Amino acid sequence: MVWQIDLSGKCIVVTGGNRGIGLAISHQVAQAGAHVAILYRQSEDAPEIAKGIAEKYDVRCVAYKCDVTDQKAVQELFRTIYHDVGPVGGVVCNAGVSHHKPALEYTKEDFYKTFEPNVWGVFVAAQAAALLWKEHQYQNGRIVFISSVSGTVANKGIAQAFYNPSKSALTMLAKALSMEWAPMGILVNVVSPGYVDTDMNQSLRDDAKARKEVEDATFVGRLSTPDEQASPTVFFLSDQASYITGSELIVDGGYSAW
Ligand code: NDP
């Protein structure tokens, strides 16, 4: 049997698809034949990046500036994407932020700064897709949350007491939505990366000692590439994953396995 992932004819929405893990996902879904809609918050080069992906893989790829926490804007945008880019077949809720600060200093603003994009924003994009699929009676929708191994383990020496629960919330959100939306043909799964070499980990690029400590804490002895997180994400979007829902795949090189 030839085992090839084919997403042609669908549009995949990738929130935060203009850089880091999201960018690798945008490339891989385009390589699998999908049209791509990238949602970004502020990066000025996002439209150029989308243009490059479109040309490289001969698909439609458009970047839309849209804050994932704005429910009304996201719902309207999904309709625009459906008509302008292609029938939405999947959404990857990847956009997220991480803040480090001792818990004794936290305020309510700090709580919202993390939970709004990481939990509410993930829900908003998933809900916008589900509403669209209900409207079009589309029965094969796929949703993937990009969570984190930090939803399972507290990273030694890193004060991120709001980031951790914002990510573990996604595991239960996926289970709850997979239960509610399975009758609509929607599958919801989670990819939980370990440490990935992206802008979010700029401090590890700047500090060789800290990077070595993280590398040594994995079994494979290194950080993940963004592509190594994109591959399992694309799998969850594919026909090959048709019986998987409400599940979480930890992709951390063994970081949390001991
Ligand atoms: P980056 O910081 O490199 O990129 C974050 C992306 O999210 C950017 O595209 C940014 O857009 C977008 N974004 C952030 N907030 C919003 C918002 N409110 N609305 C729309 N877009 C938004 O992150 P990574 O690629 O490293 O991480 C991606 C996901 O993976 C995150 O959810 C993160 O928590 C998770 N993760 C990352 C790990 C890592 O080691 N890097 C480990 C585990 C999980 P813009 O460029 O316009 O600002």
Image (cartoon, rainbow, N blue to C red):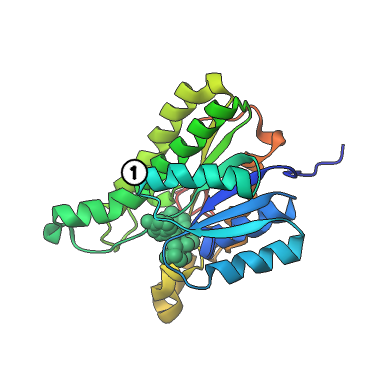
- Residue at position x 58%, y 53% in the image: 37
Viewer-side residue, 66 vs 53: 66
Say if disc 1 is inside 8 Å of ligand 1: no
Q: x, y (%) of residue 81?
A: 57, 47
Residue 92, percent from left and from top: 53, 47
Q: Is residue 50 left or right of residue 16?
A: right
Which residue is denoted by mark 1 in the rendering? Answer: 120
Q: Is residue 179 above or below residue 228?
A: above
Image coordinates of residue 216 in percent, x first then y, are: 48, 66
110 left or right, relative to 178: left
Which residue shows up at 15% across the image and 52% down it? 108
**Which residue is most to the top?**
183
Inspect the image, locate mark 1, and give the three-letter code of the amino acid beneath it.
Answer: Trp
Q: Residues within 10 Å of mark 1 (few under 14, many from 20)?
A: some
In this rendered view, identify the residue nearer to me: 60 or 150.
60
Front residue of 201 and 24: 24
